[in-house]
Amino acid sequence: MYSTSIKTKQILSAALVVASAAIFTCGQTPARKQNDRAPKSSPVLNVSDTPAQVDPETYAYDFSQPQFFIRHVVVEHDSTGRGRVVLEWLGDSTPVVEPLQLSGAALGRITSLWQALRFLDSEENYQADKQFPHLGTMKLTMRSGTRSRTAQFNWTHNREAAALVNEYRRAADQATFVFEITIARENRPLDAPKLMDQLETMVTRNGLSDPQQLIPLLRELRTDERIPLMARNHADRILKKITK
């Protein structure tokens, strides 16, 4: 679905939303890719149900647009960056749940943005005067102990809120790639070249939460004979790009 700042605010925000939405539709076929793996149980409780004794602070990003190819995305994590990503595709009622571990760098950026917003102490709703519901609805939720707050908007001129949404989109994009390339390796090898093209686009435009986390996977992909040679070679080129 779908990025940091804003006329400088408005123009950058527009580019951010459009570019992020494109990642979730770029190169995809109209039909939902079948999930050939058994559903995973969540490695962390749903943020809305997490008791304070599990983790005093929990965070969530929720995006929904029923007409988008990936129509619903939820990113949930605790204060250590551990959590899950939930993905729902158009025409598929079964969500995919992928484990999440934010890198130290990504967690630091996200935590700083929550702190800059003073989220639990603020009453700002972040919604701009102009509405863009066709771009989808975003929700940010934070819980700390017995306190919790959710803010919902479809367009914002708040710099920190826009940057926070972008961080979660990048985390979701990265998790989506890992899920889809895993399916390709196991059951749909001809999808691998297209997925590698999408990955390079995301790496080039700084569209991933932390590309360094993909290094072990890329090292596996470049020698995985289950996928086409062109995909293996592409994985090697992307690996060199990330590690140079």
Image (cartoon, helix red, strand yellow):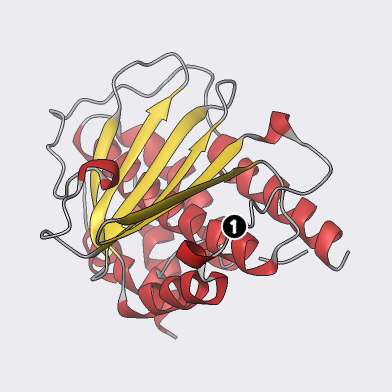
Can residue 226 be spotted in the picture? Answer: no
Instruction: Reply above or below: 34 against 174.
Output: above
Image-based side of 74 in relation to 47, left or right: right
Which residue is at 40% across, 70% downward? 210
* Amino acid found under the numbered disc labelled 1: Glu
The x, y position of residue 26, in whole percent, is: 59, 38
Image-based side of 207 in relation to 134, left or right: left
Instruction: Reply above or below: 205 against 128.
Output: below
Which quadrant of the figure has residue 86?
Answer: top left
Which residue is at 32% across, 65% downward? 214
Image-based side of 104 in relation to 132, left or right: left
The x, y position of residue 20, in whole percent, is: 62, 49
Instruction: Reply above or below: 67 against 126.
Output: above
Image-based side of 8 in relation to 210, left or right: right
The x, y position of residue 213, in whole percent, is: 30, 69
Q: Give the camera-side residue of 50 and 123.
A: 123
Q: Give the camera-side residue of 37 and 81.
A: 81
Q: Quadrant of the C terminus?
A: bottom left
Which residue is at 48% across, 31% downward? 70
Per the image, the residue denoted by label 1 is: 123
Can residue 72 be spotted in the picture? Answer: yes
Which residue is at 38% across, 60% downward? 235
The x, y position of residue 74, in whole percent, is: 39, 42
Label 1: which secondary element: loop
Q: Quadrant of the N terminus?
A: top right
Q: Residues within 10 Å of mark 1 (few under 14, many from 20)?
A: few
